[in-house]
Image: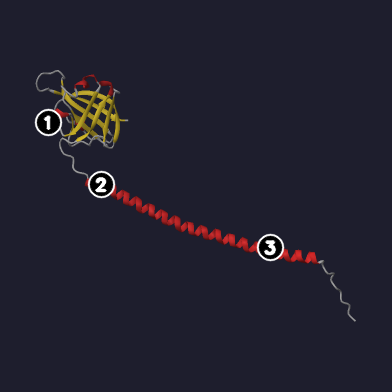
Amino acid sequence: MKLRIRRPLLPTRTRWLLRGSRYFFFIIGILALGYVGFTLLDARLYQVSAKRSLESQIVENQIQVKKEHDLIQLKPAIKKGDVLGRIDIPRLGVSVAVLQGTGSRVLRLGAGHIEGTPLPGEAGNSGIAGHRDTFFRELKDVRTNDEIQLQTATGLFRYQVDWVKVVAPDDISVLAPSPESVLTLVTCYPFYFVGPAPERFVVHAHKN
């Protein structure tokens, strides 16, 4: 005759606690898996949204660049007499508009941009001429390190005088191209000479 060993019965309260614990941990596991799944899905959706946003930004930037390029292409050609900017030399009290060209009418109205040289404010050696008995008369007192301000539609450019010299009228070496942004002011010389002046007074300045 076999003897059966009976396991002691757990108290009813303990059985309920164990059963409740199993349900509790099961629910916790489901919630944990749900949280992980939600996090991964949210990250995936954000990446899709971010990619679309970036693509949109690229397209907008390309459109903006194209618009700017088209505006440059459609910009009307500069004509003689057009106002290009203004030159100021604070220490000398010089303030004169810069026009396109160096014809007699232009130089009566202001300083003139020498054709064939870069436009004022652009890279290279920009040449500007003026009459010695009007707008450029005060250049006779210019000094090394004087500041020359050039205001154009694209901004304010500041230059510092490097040197001053007198050259022959046919000496165009002072207008030679430069890898740096420089400004060359030219006027007739001597300043108080009666009649056509035999020489040219040149002021050379570099961009700060």
First in sequence: mark 2 or mark 3? Answer: 3
Out of 109 and 162, give the one closest to the viewer: 109
Out of 129 and 28, give the one closest to the viewer: 28
**Tag shown at residue 85:** none
* Residue at 45 percent of width and 58 percent of height: 48
Helix, strand or loop under label 3: helix
Q: Which residue is the site of mark 3?
A: 25
First in sequence: mark 2 or mark 1? Answer: 2
Q: Residue furthest bottom?
A: 1
* Residue at 24 percent of width and 27 percent of height: 204
Q: Which residue is the site of mark 2?
A: 71
Q: In which quadrant of the rendered image does the C terminus lie?
A: top left
| Mark 1 residue type | Arg
Helix, strand or loop under label 1: helix
Residue 162: x %, y % from top left: 28, 25
Query: Position of 105 compared to 32: left or right?
Result: left
Quadrant in which residue 22 is drawn:
bottom right
Residue 42: x %, y % from top left: 52, 58
Helix, strand or loop under label 2: helix
| Mark 2 residue type | Leu
* Residue at 23 percent of width and 26 percent of height: 95
Q: Which residue is the site of mark 1?
A: 105
Q: For the residues marked 2 and 3, what is the alpha-carbon distance in whole angstroms?
A: 68 Å
Q: For the residues marked 2 and 1, what is the alpha-carbon distance in whole angstroms?
A: 30 Å
137, above or below 70, in the image? above
Total number of numbered discs in the rendering: 3
Quadrant in which residue 4 is drawn:
bottom right
Query: Position of 36 compared to 103: left or right?
Result: right
| Mark 3 residue type | Phe
